């Protein structure tokens, strides 16, 4: 590839990351603002604490299915179309959650929560989009930068729980629906940012560049020319990617590359730990008489751990290796669960530190495993593999979330932390398997 084209791709990579950072900031505000109140709203509408986690479980299931659907869409139309679709579907789900509170309908809340999961799907897919044009030496950093951007909206979001209640009173809607009203606005803003800024599409550029390089190697006397401007309007058709290669079935890719299977297992186990404990924390604290504002602050600390240190985690993944960071993440998750198991009802130092470490362990595991998935999958099938990874992650989290309400209702929060430790040990096992099965990563763009 000529030097000028290489510079074009480096410029486009920077523009892509900057655009995704902006969309993640406002999109995260939309998805996290209701975390501290979703279980409480579900409890009020259903009249049962055992069913309090059902809204979050439905949202996680929606995110799991949405990840697969959006991945298929991105495989054919590129990252921009998929991300915009996810944010807009999520915004409609948040609006339905508001209506559910107004009409006192648990069923409608569950439908809204399912649609709301599409925003989580879009946020997860955005981290992969950051790696499309990155080199093997910088993939972890690029992915983690987009993960970090979530800090802006994610930390601010839960702390808007109180003010959103004031907004709800002004609009004459139930207090617990206020966060969803503000969240819908954040998701629409994220969709606008992606639609305007993510041009040309990074995945289509990567595929076109790979096809051009392949053509150059086959016909060295003819230099193919692919510029960002030319591929900005590209699209895929049928089951053939823009690189000209047929998209291979996911099962075939996973069979040939067991390291990807291990990475997906680690990703799913870490997400199941985080979701199952996080969704029940507001109830555990409320049982001790903790105010909603303090609950929101604890969730903010948790989200801070999830996203704020992601760039450091990404650099560590690039320098120390993905598998090493994945294993360290499993260890941090185990420490966090020990603290959560010792936390009494209400507000306590153990729950503050435990929730922060829960987020940090999730960040380490997720950044490392996601980078492995992004770089080990063949380019023509990368979106399908990523969609399968996030689908598996979502289903595991849904299982954990569904069981968490029953466990807390029957046996208490400390017992939940004990059950979650099984998944944390699964992260360590996945790291061991990944080390044994590791293969060479996909090459970066030529030039």
Image (cartoon, rainbow, N blue to C red):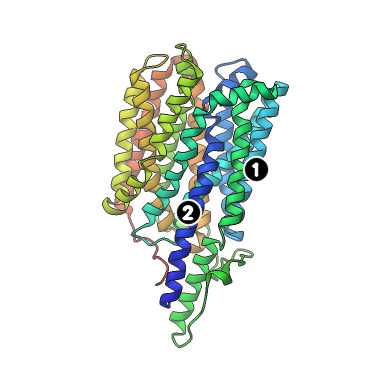
**Above or below 51: residue 304:** below
Q: Name the residue under label 2.
A: 18
Residue 156 in percent (x, y) is at 49, 33
Relative depth, front residue between 445 and 171: 171
Question: Residue lying furthest left in this view?
Answer: 320
Tag 1 residue: 89
Please name whichever residue, 264 or 312, is drawn nearer the observer in this view of the structure.
312
Q: In which quarter of the image is the N terminus?
A: bottom left
- Secondary structure category for the residue under label 1: helix
What is the number of the mark on residue 293? none
Looking at the image, which residue is at 40% across and 19% down? 415
The image quadrant of residue 235 is bottom right
User: Camera-side residue: 128 or 254?
Assistant: 128
Q: In this view, does 75 lie to the left or right of 294?
A: right
Separation of disc 1 and disc 2 at Cα? 23 Å
The C terminus lies in quadrant: bottom left
Q: Nearer the viewer, residue 132 or 173?
A: 173
- Rendering coords of residue 340 (x, y %): 36, 22
């Amino acid at each position: 590839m000529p030097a000028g084209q290489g510079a074009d791709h480096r410029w486009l990579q920077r523009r892509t990351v900057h655009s995704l950072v902006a969309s993640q900031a406002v999109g995260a505000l939309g998805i996290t603002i209701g975390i501290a109140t979703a279980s409480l709203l579900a409890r009020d509408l259903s009249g049962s604490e055992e069913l309090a986690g059902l809204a979050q479980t439905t949202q996680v299931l929606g995110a799991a299915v949405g990840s697969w659907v959006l991945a298929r869409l991105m495989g054919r139309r590129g990252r921009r179309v998929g991300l915009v679709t996810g944010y807009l579907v999520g915004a409609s789900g948040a609006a339905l959650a508001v209506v559910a509170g107004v009409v006192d309908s648990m069923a409608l809340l569950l439908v809204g929560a399912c649609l709301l999961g599409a925003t989580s799907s879009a946020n997860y897919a955005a981290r992969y989009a950051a790696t499309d044009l990155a080199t093997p030496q910088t993939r972890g950093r690029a992915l983690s930068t987009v993960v970090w951007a979530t800090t802006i909206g994610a930390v601010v979001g839960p702390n808007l729980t109180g003010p959103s209640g004031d907004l709800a009173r002004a609009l004459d809607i139930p207090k617990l629906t206020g966060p969803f009203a503000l969240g819908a606005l954040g998701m629409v803003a994220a969709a606008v940012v992606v639609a305007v800024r993510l041009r040309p599409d990074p995945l289509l550029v990567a595929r076109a560049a790979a096809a051009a390089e392949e053509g150059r190697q086959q016909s060295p006397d003819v230099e193919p020319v692919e510029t960002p401007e030319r591929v900005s309007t590209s699209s895929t058709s049928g089951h053939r990617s823009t690189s000209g290669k047929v998209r291979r079935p996911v099962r075939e890719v996973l069979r040939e590359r067991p390291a990807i299977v291990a990475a997906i297992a680690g990703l799913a186990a870490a997400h199941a730990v985080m979701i199952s404990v996080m969704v029940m924390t507001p109830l555990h604290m409320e049982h001790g008489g903790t105010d909603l504002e303090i609950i929101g602050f604890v969730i903010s600390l948790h989200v801070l751990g999830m996203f704020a240190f992601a760039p450091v985690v990404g650099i560590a993944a690039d320098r120390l290796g993905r598998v090493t960071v994945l294993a360290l993440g499993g260890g941090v998750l185990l420490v966090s669960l020990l603290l959560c198991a010792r936390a009494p009802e209400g507000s306590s130092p153990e729950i503050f530190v435990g929730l922060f470490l829960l987020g940090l362990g999730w960040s380490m595991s997720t950044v490392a495993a996601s980078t492995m998935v992004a770089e080990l999958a063949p380019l023509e099938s990368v979106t399908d593999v990523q969609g399968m990874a996030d689908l598996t992650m979502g289903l595991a989290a849904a299982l954990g979330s569904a069981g968490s309400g029953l466990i807390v209702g029957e046996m208490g929060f400390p017992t939940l932390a004990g059950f979650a430790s099984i998944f944390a040990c699964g992260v360590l096992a996945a790291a061991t398997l990944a080390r044994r099965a590791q293969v060479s990563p996909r090459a970066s763009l030529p030039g």
